[in-house]
Image: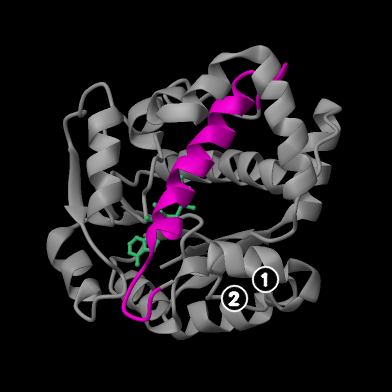
Amino acid sequence: MTKDGPDKTVEQTAGGVAMMRALEQHARQPLFADPLSARMLAGWPAVVVAHGPLRAIFLWIMERIGPGFYGAVICRTRVIDDECRAALAGGIERVVIVGAGMDTRPYRMPEMAAARVWEFDLPDVQAAKRALLPSDRAGVAYTPLDLQSPDAGEVLARTTAGSGPVLLLCEAVTMYLPDDAIERVLGYAAGLPPGSRLILTYLPRDVADDIKNSYWSRRLGWRGAFRPEELAARLTEHGLTPLSDVGAEEHRSRLLAPRGRRVNVFPGERVVVAER
Ligand SMILES: C[S@@+](CC[C@H](N)C(=O)[O-])C[C@H]1O[C@@H](n2cnc3c(N)ncnc32)[C@H](O)[C@@H]1O
């Protein structure tokens, strides 16, 4: 991480997530359907995902280097897919995705097909995504944005101005941001119309502070972290009512055990849902 802004490692995390989702499509009982994720890959990750023996070797190595990272990504993806469906079934027709990376939900989820969507991310990430996507779907607008820019909150509000509640997604982003940038996202959420929903993931403070995770903290450039009660209070301060907050334990009992899947889940990311 440079002093002034995000570095390439942060941008590359978007491709890493797409690779985990693409690998999951080859599981016997995938937690979610993301047929587009493989198209979001280039170079060696695309080669690995396309070949069964390489997939098995990669997952084996991955589990040794970052135990539970794969499980954490696939479980949070499923939880967020379900939360998106619930929000859209409730009548929300506008979706804002900050730090969208290679998220394919606007293109793969039938429930999102009719929604107006705004994607925000760093310029290089958006350019890479647009080059890899087969075609832009109508109703998706891309705006390059560095959340570390002081005017990022105004850009979000100005770009997405309009009436009707919003589904605001902020998945796997806050851990790469300093607090003032997180505050811009929460400040934007605070100004959304009533009935809007926020789905946000965060790094639990105890995981961030655990010395065992210092390699990943340095390697991934972790910054933002919260205790669950601290984040709940912060959301409340912004006029947001926390509805749920789930992590590795819930993923194991609700998603993996019923399917008989033995997947390790790193406890470094929780999914919180809040209502405006
Ligand atoms: C781990 S990826 C997650 C991408 C996507 N939300 C998903 O789950 O597939 C983190 C994303 O946050 C974006 N990001 C990190 N720092 C950012 C910043 N300062 N401004 C905007 N986006 C940022 C990265 O470019 C990347 O796409």
Magenta residue check for 264: no
Residue at image location 69% in from the left, 66% down from the top: 215
Image location (x, y in percent) of residue 81: 52, 39
Q: Position of residue 134 (x, y in %)?
A: 26, 21
When asked about the image quadrant of residue 258, the answer is: top right
**In the shown orientation, is residue 25 left or right of residue 120?**
right
Q: Considering depth in this image, is 213 or 173 the residue closer to the camera?
A: 213
| Cα separation between marks 1 and 2 | 6 Å
Q: Which mark is residue 16?
A: none
> Can residue 202 be seen by looking at this rendering?
no
Q: Is residue 12 magenta?
A: yes
On the picture, is 149 further left or further right than 230? Answer: left
Residue tagged 2: 225
Amino acid identity at mark 1 = Pro
Q: Quadrant of the C terminus?
A: bottom left
Residue range highlighted in magenta:
2-30
User: Residue at the location (41% across, 75% down)?
Assistant: 182
Residue at 53% x, 75% y is: 223
Considering only vertical position in the picture, is 149 above or below 16? below
Viewer-proximal residue among 172 and 139:
172
**x%, y% of residue 197?**
42, 58
Labels 1 & 2 near each other (Cβ < 8 A): yes
Residue of label 1: 204
Residue 216: percent from left, percent from top = 66, 63
Q: Nearer the viewer, residue 229 or 131?
A: 131
Count of residue discs: 2
| Quadrant housing residue 29 | top right
Q: Is residue 269 above or below residue 180?
A: above
Q: Residues within 10 Å of mark 1 (few under 14, many from 20)?
A: many
| Disc 1, SS | loop
Q: The residue tagged with tag 2: helix, strand or loop?
A: loop
